[in-house]
Amino acid sequence: MSTHRWKRTLAATAVAGLGVWGMSAAHAQGSRLLATSGVTEVGGSTGGGITPWAVIAGYDTGDEVGGSVTGTYVTVPNYGLTTLGAAVGIHNRFEISVAHENLNVNLGSLSSLGVLGNQPGGLGLINSGGVAPSINLGNQTISMDVLGLKARLFGDVLYTPYPQVSAGIKYKKNNDFNSNFSGLGPIGIPKFFGAASDSGTDFYVAATKVFLNGIFHRVTLVNLTLRGTKANAMGLLGFGTNANNGIAGALGTKSNDSYHAELEGSAAVFLRPDVAVGGEFRQQPDNMKYPINSSATAIGSPGTMKDVFIAYFPNKSLSLTAAYADLGPLPFQASNKGFYLSLNGTF
């Protein structure tokens, strides 16, 4: 599917979701209990802020249809991530989700990459005549579209002694893999850093359980997700590694296009029925783990994401989540800690 068709599909889904939500927010809220819909993770699926859960979008049970729309903003020094998404839950069994992500990169100009030498993959000779050109990483945007499918396999977060378990897939398409961001030809930032591909599919299994008499006798939610993925920084830096692309080979990184099994988890305690506090983590592949030298250390590679959050559910139509997030190492910046804010509407 072309980028333009992706964007039209995402926009149409989001507008339709907002319309349905606006018409139904006052009365049709489904039969499930408050907050059992979770919120929405940055990839569009129902769950926590950075990882999908086993729950299905909306508050609907076996004979109902519902869903959610969401907007999320994450800001850390020199990077900002904005996500718009929508999800539809069908009979509390299946979920279809879409999301559009924009990562703004504002690292400025880089002019000390003489170690890179002559690389194929569209990068070319960047240290000709002993003069390294300036490479502009200021005010650049990387966008990605995500299509997700999730199916509840068995269990219920509340009513069975074992967790609710769901399986899902996410198809991700990076729209800036081949964009010309600094006059180096058809090479975007993901390819510049050595990614092998502009698209990839994640596979995951999630298990979620709510304990009514949990920590400190409060309602407590626990989730574990196991994901198979090739994504670098969730896919915003492409998928896998190709030593012939960009700077990867110059720094001694080997090609790696295999799947990695990564663990994700969430835990939340409800201080009262409409307020939850908790934390999450999300492991990421180390496809871009460059050998240790001065340039490679500066460039870094994606690491484990973490957050601590507070979520407020004033009613079944709306939730607001605020978090302090650590996105793990990103290119030329080892520490990426900042704030996360998400508004989620449920219909």
Image (cartoon, grey):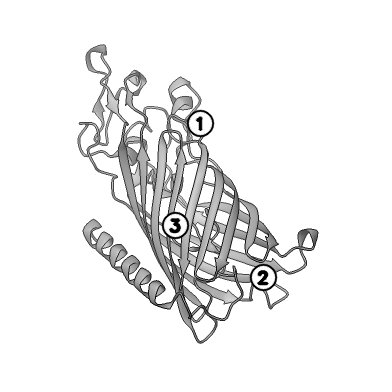
Q: Indicate whether 319 appears above or below 106.
A: below
Q: Residues within 10 Å of mark 3 (few under 14, many from 20)?
A: many
> Which amino acid lies under the numbered mark 2 shown in the image of this protein?
Pro
Q: Give the alpha-carbon distance from disc 2 to disc 3, as whole Å.
A: 23 Å
Q: Quadrant of residue 112?
A: top left
Q: Residue at x 45, y 64 (%)?
A: 169
**Which residue is at 59% across, 68% downward?**
35
Answer with left or right where residue 168 lies relative to residue 128.
Answer: right
Give the answer, above or below, for where 223 lies relative to 194. below
Residue 110 relative to residue 149: left or right = left
What amino acid is at disc 1?
Answer: Ala
Quadrant of the image containing the N terminus: bottom left
Residue 132 seen in this snapshot: yes
Q: Position of residue 19 (x, y in %)?
A: 34, 72
Label 2 with label 1: CB-CB less than 8 Å: no
Q: Where residue 248 sits: x, y (%)?
A: 38, 33
When asked about the image quadrant of residue 155, the answer is bottom right
Q: Residue 31, percent across and down?
A: 57, 81
According to the picture, the residue beneath numbered tag 3 turns out to be 43
At horizontal 70% and vertical 72% (from top left) the residue drawn is 162
Residue ID for mark 2: 163
Residue type, mark 3 in image: Gly
Spot the residue most to the top: 130
Q: Earlier in the sequence, mark 2 or mark 3?
A: 3
Screen quadrant of the C terminus: bottom left
Q: Residue 307 vs residue 302: left or right?
A: right
Q: Position of residue 130 (x, y in %)?
A: 26, 12
Residue under label 1, please give it.
334
Closer to us: 201 or 277: 277
Mark 1 to mark 3 CA distance (whole Å): 23 Å
**Count of marks overlaid on the render:** 3
